[in-house]
Image (spheres, helix red, strand yellow):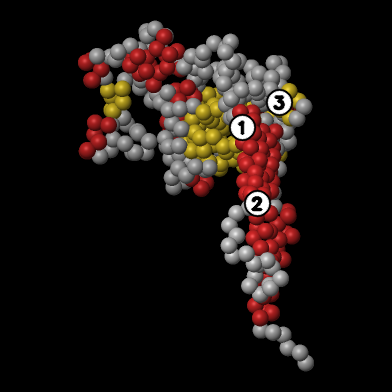
Amino acid sequence: MATLSPRIPSLIRRLSPLALLPFLSGCGLVVLDPAGDVAQQQGDLIVISTVLMLLIIVPVMALTIFFAWRYRASNKQATYKPDWDHSTQLELVIWAAPLLIIICLGAVTWVATHLLDPYRPLARTAPGQAVTEKVKPLDVQVVALDWKWLFIYPEQGIATVNELAAPVDRPLRFRISASSVMNSFYIPALAGQIYAMPGMETKLHGVFNETGDYVGFSANYSGAGFSNMRFAVKSLPAAEFEQWVASAKKGSSALDRLAYLKLEKPSEKEPVQHFASVEPQLFDAVVNMCVEPGKMCMHDMMSIDAAGGAGIAGIGNVRAVTYDKFAARGTADLARWSARYVAALCSSPIMSNDKPDATPVDLAPLTGAGLRRPSDPPPQTALNAASSRPMS
C-alpha cells in the first residue's frame, strides 16, 4: 500500500487557510461600496489609481519571473552577452510607460482633489442629478468630545450624542470642531474623513443615496476612550427623518452652556442622548472657546489684538478656571498662572456663520488650478471681519 509523503500533510496545513477565501466574499467593503455619492466617487478614484499602478506592477513582476527562468544558468539555449549594458529601445519602454501612467494619475487626482474638496458645496446628489438653488442642505454642527460625538441641528433646534440621522438624497453640510484634542470625523459610507480641532472649524459636504444604518467613528487617536468613540448613523426617508426629529423634541433635556460643560467632561461608552432644545450659537461659542460664562471669545481677543491690545489694564483681566479639560492644564504649582482665562471686556455677539456656503457652487467645469476667477472679489478673512466690527 502506498504511503503519503510526509511533506503532503504539512503542505495541506499551510494551504488550508486558502479554503476560507470564498467565505470572505460576504464581507462588506463599505469604502468601495458606500451609500453616498461623494464616498462612491472617492472609492472609484481608489480603484482607478490602483488599476493604473497595476499596469506597471503586474508586468514588472511577470517579467522578473520570466527573465529569472529564461536566463537561468542551466538554460544553455539562452543568449549569453556578458558585455551588454544598454538598449535604447528598452530604455524608451522602461521610462515611457511609467511616465504616461504618472501623467494619467496626476490628471485624475488633480480633478478629483478639487471636485471632492470637503469644503466645496455639492454640485450633485447623484450622477446626473444636479443640486438646484431650491435644494436647501441640512446643516449639522459636530463637536468631538472626550470620548463621544455631539451633533447639533440648528434648523431643527435639537442635539444628539453618538447618533446622527439624515434624510436620504438631501445634501448634508457639516461644521466640525472639537473640545480638547484633535479627532478625525469619518463616516465611510458618506464621505472622506476630516479633522476636528479645538478652536477651529472644518467643513464637510456629503449626501446619502441609500437608506440604512451605518457607523461613524474617529480615525485619529485621542486618548484612552478612543476605541469606543463610535456613533450610529441613520439614513432615513424624509418622512421618517421628520418623525425622528419629532421624537427627539418630545424629551425634556435642554443643551445650554452649563449642560454642555457637564457633557464635555471625559466619559467612555456614552449611550445615545437626545436634547429637545439647544442654546442658540452654542457651536460658535465652542469654536471661539468661550462656552464658560464670562470668558472672552477668540474673535473678541483677535479684535482687541488688531486694535493694538487692551493696554496695561489687560494684565489683571483674568479669572480662575474651575474646570479645564479634565485637569489637563493649570493644576500643578509650576503652572498655577496658566489656570486662568481672559475675562470678557464687552458683550459683542459671537461671530455666527449661519450660512457657511452662501455662494452657491459653480456647476461649470474646472478650468484652472482651483483658483478663483479674476473677476471674483477677493475673499475676506474672519480676522478682517472681526477687526472691522466696532466693539461695544
For marks 3 and 2, give the CA distance: 46 Å
The quadrant in which residue 222 appears is: top left
Q: Secondary structure at mark 1?
A: helix
**Residue annotated with mark 2:** 90
**Residue annotated with mark 3:** 124
Q: Position of residue 200 (x, y in %)?
A: 45, 27
For marks 1 and 3, give the CA distance: 19 Å
**Residue annotated with mark 1:** 110
Task: Choose between 46 and 140: the one closer to the eye.
Answer: 46
For this orientation, the residue located farthest to the bottom is 1
- Mark 1 vs 3, N-terminal side: 1
Q: Position of residue 330 (x, y in %)?
A: 28, 35
- 99 relative to 176, above or below: below
Q: Position of residue 351 (x, y in %)?
A: 46, 16
For this orientation, the residue located farthest to the front is 83
- Mark 3 vs 2, N-terminal side: 2
- Mark 1 vs 2, N-terminal side: 2
The residue that appears at 29% across and 15% down in the rendered structure is 309
Which of pointers 1 and 2 indicates the residue nearer the eye? Answer: 2
The residue that appears at 51% across and 48% down in the rendered structure is 227
Q: Position of residue 96 (x, y in %)?
A: 65, 44
Identified by mark 3, the residue type is Arg
